[in-house]
Amino acid sequence: MRQQGFSLIELVVVVTVIGILIVAGAFEYMDWQGRYRVESQIKQMYADLLKAKQQAMQTNMPYLVVFSSNGYTICEDSNPANNSCDAAERAAPSSTSLSKSGLEYKINWFLAPNPPAANTILLDQRGLISPADPNNSNWSAMAQLTKSDNSSWENGKVDYDCIDISATRIKLGKFDNDGTVCNNMGTCCGR
């Protein structure tokens, strides 16, 4: 006579296999979630820069982007003589909707050649990008996200973690293993 059911050994094996799959899935999910947050932040920054460039051309007013380590401020430069975001310009509705602070991942901002206060770029009415400092004529710029202490993302595993900025283009990119070059993703993503 045959009994229906599972033996204790079969039950333990099935529960162990399910437990291993749950643990492996949880680690993969945490890794995916970390990559997602990095890419989400860099894509939001990219979208804000493109929107500011578009608004500068539509309104025929220059826009400034001021980077700090924990965010960025984008404002219409209603007083182009001083090339800075004044308090009234920062409070404008378009500026507050594009500006971000308290970001999860810090921004490393590179403007070469890099004088100490070079953290501002100008988006002019023709869609051209330049440093706000008019004496800085030969330049290149990059914005890179850096890990926070509790982040689970590894370099090389994200699709995008930097933005490459030139006089005419803003492109999403991925830093090389050395963390020195932002390899933009060709012409797929730049405008």
Image (tube, rainbow, N blue to C red):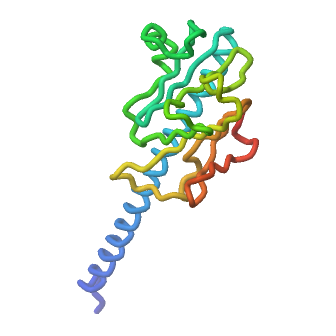
Q: Nearer the viewer, residue 167 or 98?
A: 167
Q: Is residue 7 left or right of residue 38?
A: left
Which quadrant holds residue 61?
Answer: top right
> Which of the 4 image quarters holds residue 14?
bottom left
Count numbered badges in the picture.
0
162 relative to 82, above or below: below
Observer-nearest residue: 169 or 85? 85
Indicate the position of residue 179 as horizontal and vertical percent values: 55, 55
Left or right: 1 in relation to 50: left
Residue 67 point in image, percent of width and height: 49, 30
Q: Residue furthest bottom?
A: 1
Query: At x 66% / y 26%, what residue is drawn?
Result: 130
Q: Image point 54% across, 34% down: which residue?
A: 115
The N terminus sits in image quarter: bottom left
x 68%, y 12%: residue = 58
Q: Nearer the viewer, residue 30 or 169?
A: 169
The foreground one among 12 and 173 is: 173
Would residue 5 be seen by someone viewing this image from the given angle?
no
**Could you tell me if residue 34 is visible in this image?**
yes
Task: Report x, y in % for residue 45.
Answer: 54, 33
